[in-house]
Amino acid sequence: MTIRQLPAQLINQIAAGEVVERPASVIKELVENSLDAQATTIKIGIEQGGIKRIQVSDNGCGIPKDELALALSRHATSKISSIDELLNVRSLGFRGEALPSIASVSRLSLISRIAEESHAWQISGDGNEQFESPIPASLPCGASVTVHDLFFNIPARRKFLRTERTEFGHVEMVVRRLALSRFDIELQLQHNGKTVYSLPTAVDTKSCEKRLQILCGQAFASQSLHFEQEAAGMRLSGWMSQPTFSRSQPDLQYFFVNGRPVRDKVVVHAVKQAYADVLFHGRHPAY
Ligand code: ADP
Ligand code: MG
C-alpha cells in the first residue's frame, strides 16, 4: 500500500461518522449553531422523522455572502481563534466540523442574510466538496439550513436509520432537551406539516411552568417544586418532583450545566441519595 492524502470529501464523511449519527444529531448541531448566532426564535421542520428533510431556520446574526462557502468548509469557525479562547469558550460549537460533515452526507442548502445586506444568499451542495457560488434568495435576517436525504450517498449508514417513528422519537428528545435548556428562546417543531411544539419565550414563572407542562407533562408540572440555590460561586435552579410523583424509569431527568445538557453519574447518584428515604425502591424521581 502506498501512502496517500485522503480526499477532502472522504475526510468530511469520516468526521460525519462521529458528529452525524441520525436526523436528531443533525438537528442538535443546527440548533446549537442558531443559539451560538444569538437567535431568539428557532423553527425546526422535518419530514419523515428527518430522514427525508430537516430544516432549521433562525433569526440570528446570519452569515455574510462571502463567508457562506467557508461555513461549509472544514475547520472553519467564527467562534475561536486561539488556544486561550478555547479554554474560555462560551459557544456550543467551536470545531468547525458540523456543517461540512452534514454537507458531505446529504443534499444541503444554506440560506442566510445579515442585517447589512438587502437580500439573502443561498449556497447548496449535493454531498461533494464543491459548492456553486451563492445565488440571491429570500429570507429575513438570520440563517436557514435545509438537509435533504441524509446519508443518500452512504448506503451503509442509511441502512442503520430506523423507522420514521423511531427517528422522530430521537428528534423529539433532542428538541425537548434544547427547549428545557433555554426558556428564553422561542422554539417550534413541525413534523410532516403538523405542529408538534410551539413554545413562546418563557420569562416569568407562569410561562416557564407552561413550557414545563408541555415538555414534561401536567403531572410533573403540578407535583414538582421550583428551587433556586446559590453557594460557592455557583447557582443551581430547576424543578424537582415531590415524592407523590415518581417514575418506573429514570426517563424524566434533565440536567444542564451552563445551558448544556449533561448526563453525569455523580449527579444521578446524588439525586438518588437525596430521594432514598422518600421513594420506594425501584422508583425514580423526575427533575
Ligand atoms: P462551529 O459551530 O464549530 O463553529 P459549524 O460547522 O457548526 O462549526 O459552523 C461553522 C460556522 O458557520 C460557525 O462558526 C458560524 O460562523 C457559521 N454558522 C453556522 N450556522 C450558523 C447560523 N445558524 N447563523 C450564523 N452563523 C452560522
Ligand atoms: Mg456548530
Image: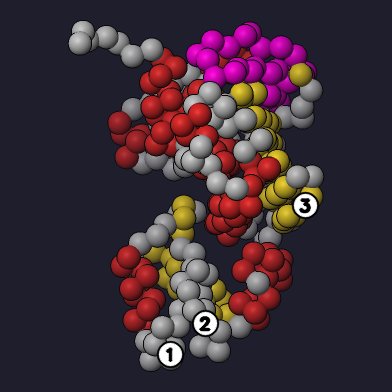
Q: How many marks?
A: 3
User: Horizontal placement of 140 versus 236: left or right?
Assistant: right
Query: Which percent across, then down, holds residue 107?
Result: 61, 24
Marked residue nearer the N-terminal end (3 or 2): 3
CB under 8 Å between discs 1 and 2? yes
Q: Specify whether tag 2 is near ligand 2 (CB below 8 Å).
A: no
Residue behind mark 1: 280
User: Horizontal placement of 141 versus 90: left or right?
Assistant: right
Query: 36 or 253, which is in the foreground?
Result: 253
Q: Residues within 10 Å of mark 1 (few under 14, many from 20)?
A: few
Looking at the rendering, the stretch of residues picked out in magenta corresponds to 110-136
Residue behind mark 3: 195
Regarding mark 1 in the picture, which secondary structure is present there?
Answer: loop
Location of residue 158 with respect to 119 vertically, above or below: below
User: Horizontal placement of 269 versus 133: left or right?
Assistant: left
Q: Is residue 203 visible?
A: yes
Residue behind mark 2: 246
Regarding mark 3 in the picture, which secondary structure is present there?
Answer: strand
Residue type indicated by callout 1: Phe
Q: CA distance from mark 1 to mark 3?
A: 38 Å
Instruction: Residue at 35%, 62% (x, y): give it.
Output: 264
Residue type indicated by callout 2: Ser
Query: Which percent across, then down, holds residue 100?
Result: 49, 24
